[in-house]
Amino acid sequence: MAVSGPEPRPLLYVVRRAHFSAAHRLYNPRFSEEWNRRTFGKCASPHYHGHNYTLEVVVAGSPHPETGYVIDLAKLAEIIDEVIVQKCDHRNLNTEVDFLHGLIPSTENLAVAFWRQLEPRIVQGRLYAIRLYETERNYVEYRGEYDAH
Amino acid sequence: MAVSGPEPRPLLYVVRRAHFSAAHRLYNPRFSEEWNRRTFGKCASPHYHGHNYTLEVVVAGSPHPETGYVIDLAKLAEIIDEVIVQKCDHRNLNTEVDFLHGLIPSTENLAVAFWRQLEPRIVQGRLYAIRLYETERNYVEYRGEYDAH
Amino acid sequence: MAVSGPEPRPLLYVVRRAHFSAAHRLYNPRFSEEWNRRTFGKCASPHYHGHNYTLEVVVAGSPHPETGYVIDLAKLAEIIDEVIVQKCDHRNLNTEVDFLHGLIPSTENLAVAFWRQLEPRIVQGRLYAIRLYETERNYVEYRGEYDAH
Amino acid sequence: MAVSGPEPRPLLYVVRRAHFSAAHRLYNPRFSEEWNRRTFGKCASPHYHGHNYTLEVVVAGSPHPETGYVIDLAKLAEIIDEVIVQKCDHRNLNTEVDFLHGLIPSTENLAVAFWRQLEPRIVQGRLYAIRLYETERNYVEYRGEYDAH
Amino acid sequence: MAVSGPEPRPLLYVVRRAHFSAAHRLYNPRFSEEWNRRTFGKCASPHYHGHNYTLEVVVAGSPHPETGYVIDLAKLAEIIDEVIVQKCDHRNLNTEVDFLHGLIPSTENLAVAFWRQLEPRIVQGRLYAIRLYETERNYVEYRGEYDAH
Amino acid sequence: MAVSGPEPRPLLYVVRRAHFSAAHRLYNPRFSEEWNRRTFGKCASPHYHGHNYTLEVVVAGSPHPETGYVIDLAKLAEIIDEVIVQKCDHRNLNTEVDFLHGLIPSTENLAVAFWRQLEPRIVQGRLYAIRLYETERNYVEYRGEYDAH
């Protein structure tokens, strides 16, 4: 790849993983109990259940020549801790997290909400993707995209 | 090893792993809110949190010569499902599980309670141990023993 | 991103993981035994070997506002079970699976064949990718793309 | 612990993990097809299925003062490779492994057979246990014991 | 089990897992370079190599009736952090850890040394075992026993 | 997708995972000790630390009709072993690896350096991505791209 001017900088994707444990239930208050039970099955169970969530935060950018870092992963870990873990860990996602109020806490909706909290805080590199694991078998990825279909 | 009489039968430990997701909180109602918060920290959070629990059930015995099985692990899986998973999965361990009523749902207490539910149901081989993982970092094992110290 | 008209809907990738255990061998009947042995090494071993396969199915779409779901992962799990697991689990991939007849069951070919079975069945959201793990060290991803090189 | 004479040597358990992929089926030729199907379910499927087996070999002993090793784990890995992996990897456990002939290849029976192959070869320290994982959910442990029940 | 007097207390084994990353090499200064290279192979490489170590600490005891805890795992985590992780993480095990001076840092020797640091600090319950993973394939367990062979 | 001429060939991404253990430290010799300590924290610890690195190499291409392989993963494993593992395993990444001289061995810089070693050697299919895990919580991906921001 011929490039004039300064040497092109490689584009890396760096990932930091975090964990939190929370209670939730899937429930849409605009519909009946029966609709919720039929739609969400045991996930609508009224006294809540919970998960050990795993969150992966992917930041894209080029390594700074002085450090070799896209972003100091210890700093990224602090941001994730402050913005997400401190607010969600050992909490009830339906009732206790300010930025989730009014939201059905499906993994999809959580991932979009986490993106919106994290995106303005990532100033070295840029937020590229979030992966949120509800269990080892179920997870979602969000890349800040909108659906054109 | 010289043995007279019938050929000695090897003693095996067979293990089946199961998963369930549940809400809980650590709280002792005989003490004040302040005591609970001081003792259990964020685990006492009043609106519950939750975990993806992993349960390992270990059965000891010798393989039946006709099958090579200590116990059919599909049958063991059914027992675990009926006795534990159906009652605990997507449930609140403080309020919704009959055999946990009145118990502080620490991992230790859960393991002992699960043993007592499972032990009478294991009739091929005998229950040897239970391992209950609350997270990847915290787990307990119970072998049906009593503390002599 | 300025958008006129209805609010843009976030595009999510939701993933469901499944497992099956199967026998196979790599063998091309149009060539000699010697060619097969030289080309596939121990993977051509005539009496078969086998694997615990892990399959990840990735569906892209936007969460439905009533449910927060791109697709109910319990429904996706049922589709995967019906279309793939029921046909492949505890089976011989060379001889027993109708939609694999005539195919060398390499992980690559399996992934493409699984895509073609699953794609018409995914009607909420759209199939985005399949990841198939033959072992922890070897896996493939297929996104329904064709090679332009 | 007061000990006269030479300093007591700590007793350690060192573990080496290995992997192999093999085909098998559960089938007892002394019984009918119908008995086998009823007893072993899909595990009796006639054209075989297979697994990625994980084998853990536990050797007990005290570290040699010159090396800090109970046994050089690279040497233990070579023994496991020669005695088990070379014979079982990418093989059919019902038909191709000499020391398994006539055996129903249940995980229990495999573990005892592997113990008998490995035990005479472990001359630094002594074989303490074998753990054989058929899947992530099903595994067995054998410690060379006999059942007194 | 008929017991007179107070109700017997179940004996549980609670486990806490921790991680640290460190450099080391296997080298016995009482022998020649050539002996070290022959004995330890690439593990004797002079400029060090390193590992992500995983440490599991197992404490035995009965749950306190007021808390359901054998030991508060957050407190156990603090002890492990203070006694082991703060001293070993991002350190050179051959040169920088006071309680390892003069020791060949084999996994076996590390496990015994960690036991001796931790054992006097565990005053709720009693230290039962340490498992130290050098890699996913190599690990050791120490239970405070001495070898009678 | 209507295509004239020969049948379009599916584009697959095949992945091979490898492991190596190495020592490193993060240190920029153009700056003071104090700057390095402030910038890299414990990662600058002068006597090195180390990690069990996991490397995933992703090759894109279409399966050859005679083999069903994009690339024989055993051959890919040999290339990874020759080009990366033999040079880095049980080595010091700051001082002992020719192609890393003069580089701060951050995970980002390692990934780009590994890409440059591997890319010319992948002649069946083409190198698509590298994922390098320093720990289970920290990893990077490089796809041979340059940053346009």
Image (cartoon, coloured by chain):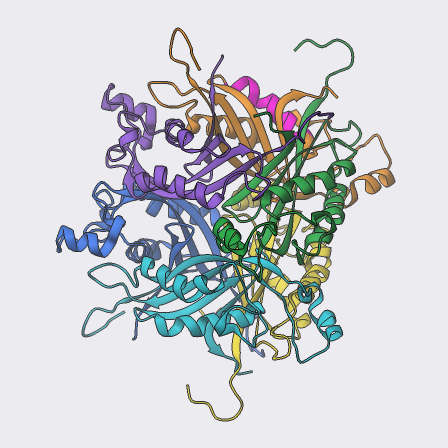
Chain colours: A green, B cyan, C purple, D blue, E yellow, F orange
The part of the chain drawn in magenta is F109-122
Q: Is residue D25 found left or right of F99 in the rendered image?
A: left
Residue at 77% of width from left, 42% of height from top?
Answer: A75
Q: Nearer the viewer, residue B61 or B24?
A: B24
As drawn, F45 above or below E18? above
Is residue B9 visible from the viewing direction of this image? yes
Q: Percent from the top left, x then y, of residue E72?
A: 65, 69
Is residue E27 visible from the viewing direction of this image? no
For the C terminus of chain B, the quadrant is bottom right
As drawn, F115 above or below A83? above
Name the residue at the top extreme: F5
Q: Percent from the top left, x then y, of residue B97?
A: 50, 69
What secondary structure do most residues of the magenta stretch adopt? helix
Q: Is residue A6 found left or right of B110 in the rendered image?
A: right
Residue at 77% of width from left, 36% of height from top?
Answer: A120
As drawn, B57 above or below A36? below
Q: How many marks?
A: 0
Residue at 54% of width from left, 32% of height from top?
Answer: C60
- Image-quadrant location for residue F83: top right
Q: Percent from the top left, x then y, of residue C117?
A: 37, 30
Q: Is residue A105 found left or right of A77 in the rendered image?
A: left
Membership of D84 in magenta stretch: no
Q: Nearer the viewer, residue E22 or A15?
A: A15
Membership of F119 in magenta stretch: yes
Q: Percent from the top left, x then y, of residue E52?
A: 61, 47
Q: Nearer the viewer, residue B88 or A5?
A: B88
For the N terminus of chain B, the quadrant is bottom left
Name the residue at the bottom extreme: E5
